[in-house]
Amino acid sequence: MSSVNPGALPQSDEAQPKKRNEWPLWEVFIRGQHGMSHRHVGSLHAPDADMAIRNARDVYTRRNEGVSIWVVEARHIAASSPSDKGPLYEPSESKVYRHPTFYDIPDEAGHM
Amino acid sequence: MYAQMIQSEATAEDPDKLAAFEARIAAGEKIEPKDWMPAGYRKTLIRQIGQHAHSEIVGQLPEGNWITRAPTLERKAILLAKVQDEAGHGLYLYCAAETLGVSRDELTEMLLDGRMKYSSIFNYPTLTWADMGAVGWLVDGAAIMNQVPLQRTSYGPYSRAMIRICKEESFHQRQGYDIMMKMAFGTPAQKRMAQDALNRFWYPALMMFGPSDKESVHSAQSMAWKIKMNTNDELRQKFVDETVPQAEYLGLTVPDPDLKWNEERGHYDFSEPDWSEFFDVLKGNGPCNADRMEARQQAWAEGQWVRDGLMAHARKRAARRVAAE
């Protein structure tokens, strides 16, 4: 997911240039032909949601990749923090009994 | 390649963080935008991805030159689709660069004021229709050589952009070779045009990989960080080995009298391009540098009112919506 905090220019320490009138950033989600959920495919700039969908059509579905497009302005996305990785996912890591392979079923019982 | 002569940057970092970061890369993990990364990794990536993105955008110009003069409607439609893909590839790459904390407009401004560069190859003119064949076959072919391994690069957004691009790129090379076949197997005059295009694009295509980086500390750092996956020389050799039989099939001659299969090495021996020409083109003295930059500057300046107008319209509509609620 792209989160943009325009920072210092990579090659210069000069004063920040004038404020830009830049189109906001949108994240694009596309549902493919095969009934899967919408999936994040990338981002783009557009002045508003209508234009974001049109641009997403041109940028991300030039080869029939999708039958449905969602766009959401990047600044509206909340994301988990990478440093929380351990504590956030620990509860599921310790529960091996949630997986079918935890249980031994005898062959005599047939396919299960 | 599309990103040539990228300087890597060593920065002073917390040694523990740096060691943990490099261990992640060594283990094949992807680095994602919000993860800790050394400032040098970030800066090098912004330069490399930015230069790659600019190359895709500027790369539309030499081919755009022939859209209105394509010999058939089908060729015209194909060329349009290819050039549209290049715009898309530029946009994927700008998005990837933006996750590192630089905005697309900033990158564009850096291209326009000369602080950032694009690949040297796009400073050569496309003089005949056969050049559309040579560009697709050789230039896109060389790009693929570099981009396929970059799908495994350590930075997640860059890797994902490369995967998308590679999926689409093979059409580009094949349509170029298809043009070359038509020309090379056509009339004697057409075959001469095909040979002439190969003559003019061979060495500039070899230059796309950049000079030998055996001694380069920048390359060593970028390879350790998996920003760069192969040396320039490895990729150039691979390109020559794959391309020579394709030229032979066309009945065309690679313009290198010293080109020879080396049984012992299992590779072709070939002549180096003229590196003084390469550095001269990078400096801005290639045949089309001024034209390319002028075209980009004009497009940016003349598009200003459209960008501003659409933004003003979006703000007005948003304000009306708020007022109606």
Image (tube, rainbow, N blue to C red):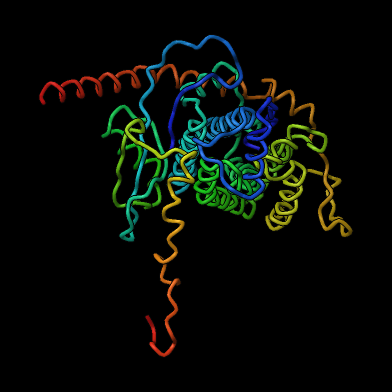
Q: Residue furthest bottom?
A: A108
User: Which of the image's four quarters has the C terminus of chain B?
Assistant: top left
Looking at the image, can residue B90 be seen? Answer: yes
Residue shown at 41%/90% (left/top)?
A: A108
Q: Position of residue B100 (x, y in %)?
A: 52, 31
Compared across the picture, whether B75 is left or right of B46 comes to left
Compared across the picture, whether A59 is left or right of B322 comes to right
Above or below, B244 relative to B305: below
User: Which of the image's four quarters has the N terminus of chain B?
Assistant: top right
Looking at the image, can residue B134 be seen? Answer: no
The image quarter in which residue B248 lies: bottom right
Q: Foreground residue, B48 or B60? A: B48
Q: Position of residue A45 (x, y in %)?
A: 38, 30
Q: Foreground residue, B240 or B179? A: B240
Above or below, B40 relative to A80: above
Q: Position of residue B186 (x, y in %)?
A: 61, 53
Q: Position of residue B200 (x, y in %)?
A: 70, 37
Residue shown at 41%/71% (left/top)?
A: A100
Q: Residue furthest left?
A: B324
* Label tally: 0
Residue shown at 50%/36% (left/top)?
A: B33
Q: Foreground residue, A31 or B253? A: A31
Q: Foreground residue, B290 or B161? A: B161
